[in-house]
Image: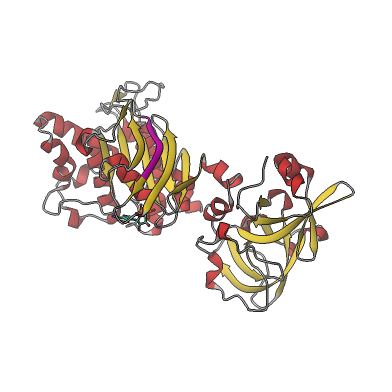
């Protein structure tokens, strides 16, 4: 975690410095008073002004894609993306993310509904006239062309003047720290450098919209964390409306202004990342966003003497009044079953907590202890009932690594402090932060808020 943060900070500084050119005499990395502005349209300057560029809100209105074999890859998608916004479309494989993106790009016909970019419906506008630039997973660089020519390629096709091309490529190279690599061929570049060349090629086109389809999947884990911070930073400075597709919830949480969660072609929730995390619209979103995934249990809401609680197996966990304030509808579930969502980070080894209240403990046996350095992922078998409903059926499960003993109940994954003595085969008391429990309707999977 720490190194990731360190990377992000370093890269943000770098982009900022690159965006504002110091006078020739000033040493590199120091900003003079008379900063010369880059010409890229859309660049947000430090004084708050923004260079002129095309306005490009993107609106999906009841959009569907039906492939010839009848597959409804995208269904009834309505989504409003503001001008300059960075939206991440996230969901498991096959949920329709790429199809949605390709319809914006003009690479797939729109079967139903309308997509608008700026102030025009683009359903019948050819891809080349939509003023968009795409970055794909495979960077699709020309192996026989230098970095300079790869970045310049689209501009040469447009027959722009040599001066303009040189200027734009230089600026993009500076922004992406590719200046010293312009004469190299792609084969002599690292994965991260190739990725930046692909970004450069998109940037020089000065599009109204960036579309990115899993652009980081070919990078190793550490570089991915570093590069996602760079892309986020770059997008904010350029201010260009961006749709970014990924199956990686971590990218969705860290990069976007807003996250659109898809499942089987349908939009589940569209909200800022923190809201998607703290107030998931349904159990699917709750389980998909966050790593390790939310644990799901069967529970029953009970009220006695005015106090509300949730029965999990034979234990009743009390719920604070703040829970009911945030979820007034929960009161209507008295004596009814609910799906209880427990995030791994809402669980702690009780032995590490002084005066852990005994009525907030769950008991289990440690099946697996994964040490990650600063923390542990502890897989715990319990006698509680798992909530195996269709609401959470097609989620990727973290617990799949551990075979569930046939006679036991739900497996829980807890995110414990590294000091926890929990060990495989031993028993453990888990302290649950009941204020941060999630509740979903067992029939529909919809979050219980009100
Ligand atoms: P994602 O990007 O979320 O992985 P896709 O948009 O690629 O999902 O695919 C959504 C659904 O559409 C999947 O069920 C996929 O199999 C199907 N699909 C994609 N392309 C085609 C096609 N050309 N013909 C038929 N079905 C397709």
342 with respect to 114 (left or right): right
Quadrant of the rendered image containing residue 278: top right
Q: Residue at x 67, y 61 (%)?
A: 297
Q: How many marks?
A: 0
Does the stretch in magenta take in 28?
Answer: no
Residue in the image at 41% along x and 22% along y: 48
Residue 380, image x and y in percent?
65, 70
Q: Front-most of 100 and 172? A: 100
Question: Residue drawn at (66%, 55%), measured in percent from left and top?
Answer: 346
Q: Does residue 62 belong to the magenta stretch? A: yes
Q: Is residue 13 above or below residue 350?
A: above
Decide: is 387 above or below 104.
Answer: below
In which quarter of the view is residue 82 placed?
top left
For the point 15% across and 29% down, which residue is it?
164
As drawn, which residue projects farthest toward the right? 305
The answer to whether residue 234 is visible is no
Question: Where ligand 1 lies, by image quadrant?
Answer: bottom left
Q: Position of residue 202 (x, y in %)?
A: 25, 40
Which residue is at the front of the view, 138 or 378? 138
State which quarter of the image contains the C terminus. top right
- Write the start and end of the magenta stretch as one range: 57-64
Q: Position of residue 219 (x, y in %)?
A: 34, 57
Q: Residue 226: x, y in percent? A: 40, 49
């Amino acid at each position: 975690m720490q190194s990731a943060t360190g990377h992000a900070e370093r890269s943000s500084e770098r982009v900022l410095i690159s965006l504002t050119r110091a006078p020739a005499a000033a040493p590199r990395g120091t900003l003079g008073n008379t900063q010369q502005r880059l010409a890229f349209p859309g660049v947000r300057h430090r004084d708050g002004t923004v260079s002129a560029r095309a306005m490009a809100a993107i609106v999906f209105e009841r959009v569907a894609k039906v492939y010839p074999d009848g597959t409804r890859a995208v269904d009834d998608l309505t989504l409003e993306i503001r001008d300059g916004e960075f939206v991440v479309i996230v969901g498991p494989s096959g949920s329709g993310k790429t199809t949605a993106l390709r319809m914006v790009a003009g690479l797939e016909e729109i079967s139903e509904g309308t997509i608008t970019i700026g102030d025009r419906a683009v359903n019948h506008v050819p891809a080349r006239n939509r003023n968009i630039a795409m970055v794909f997973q495979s960077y699709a660089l020309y192996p026989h062309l230098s970095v300079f020519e790869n970045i310049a390629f689209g501009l040469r096709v447009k027959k722009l003047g040599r001066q303009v091309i040189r200027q734009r490529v230089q600026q993009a190279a500076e922004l992406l720290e590719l200046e010293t690599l312009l004469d190299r061929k792609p084969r002599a570049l690292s994965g991260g450098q190739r990725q930046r060349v692909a970004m450069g090629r998109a940037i020089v086109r000065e599009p109204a919209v960036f579309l990115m389809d899993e652009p980081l999947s070919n990078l190793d884990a550490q570089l991915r964390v570093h590069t996602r911070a760079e892309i986020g930073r770059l997008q904010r400075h350029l201010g260009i409306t961006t749709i970014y597709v990924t199956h990686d919830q971590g990218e969705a949480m860290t990069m976007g202004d807003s996250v659109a969660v898809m499942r089987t072609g349908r939009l589940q929730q569209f909200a800022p990342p923190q809201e998607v995390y703290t107030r998931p619209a349904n159990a699917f979103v709750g389980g998909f966003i966050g790593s390790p995934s939310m644990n799901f249990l069967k529970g029953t809401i009970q009220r006695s003497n005015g106090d509300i609680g949730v029965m999990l197996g034979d234990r009743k966990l009390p719920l604070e009044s703040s829970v009911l304030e945030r979820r007034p509808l929960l009161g209507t579930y008295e004596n009814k079953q609910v799906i209880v969502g427990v995030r791994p980070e809402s669980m702690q080894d009780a032995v590490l907590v002084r005066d852990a209240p005994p009525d907030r403990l769950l008991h289990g046996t440690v099946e697996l202890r994964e040490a990650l350095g600063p923390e542990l992922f502890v897989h715990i078998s319990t006698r509680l009932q798992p909530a195996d409903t269709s609401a959470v059926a097609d989620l990727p499960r973290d617990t799949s690594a551990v075979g569930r003993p046939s006679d036991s109940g739900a497996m829980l994954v807890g995110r414990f402090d590294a000091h926890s003595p929990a060990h495989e085969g031993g028993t453990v008391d888990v302290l649950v932060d009941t204020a941060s429990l999630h509740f979903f309707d067992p029939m529909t999977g919809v979050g219980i808020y009100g």
